[in-house]
Image (tube, helix red, strand yellow):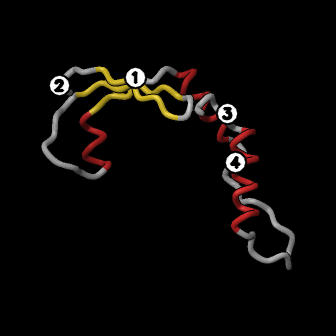
Amino acid sequence: MVDLGYHLIVSKNGYNFEFEVLKLIDKRVGAPLAVECYTDHTPEEELHKYERWFIGKARPEFRDKGTGRPTKKDRRTLEDYKGEMYNFGED
């Protein structure tokens, strides 16, 4: 059960985020209201770890003009390759 002042550690894809509950709400709300209900205590080194990984990854995949859309097999092969390259320990 989560209560006021509760410290929560969320681990996702090799990153550890830390939050403190400031306010309890009864139902789902939008992000502008939700952000008032917690404080982010994630250490700076964790935040920079995410930024270092994300830099340069926002561009779409490049494909030569005229080659058409990738097939399902092409997509799966690419996802497998990227999964091997950026695997953060989750199996």
Dot 4: what SS? loop
Residue highlighted by disc 3:
52
Disc 3 to disc 1, C-alpha distance: 19 Å
Relative vertical location of residue 70 with respect to residue 61 in this rendering, above or below: below
For label 3, count other residues whose C-alpha is less than 10 Å away and answer few (under 14), some (14-19) or many (20+): few
Q: Earlier in the sequence, mark 2 or mark 4?
A: 2
Is residue 45 rendered to the left or right of residue 32?
right
The disc placed on residue 41 is 1
Residue displayed at 30% across by 24% down:
20
Query: To which quarter of the image does residue 90 belong?
Result: top right
Q: Earlier in the sequence, mark 2 or mark 1?
A: 2
Q: Secondary structure at mark 2?
A: loop
Instruction: Pick whichever of labels 3 and 4 is earlier in the sequence.
Output: 3
Residue identifier under label 4: 57
Snapshot quadrant of residue 88: top right
Q: Which is nearer the N-term, disc 3 or disc 1?
A: 1
* Dot label at residue 3: 2
Badge 4: how crowded within 10 Å, few (<14), some, or many (20+)? few
Question: Where's the N terminus, which quadrant?
Answer: top left
Q: Which mark is residue 53?
A: none
Alpha carbon distance from label 3 to label 2: 34 Å
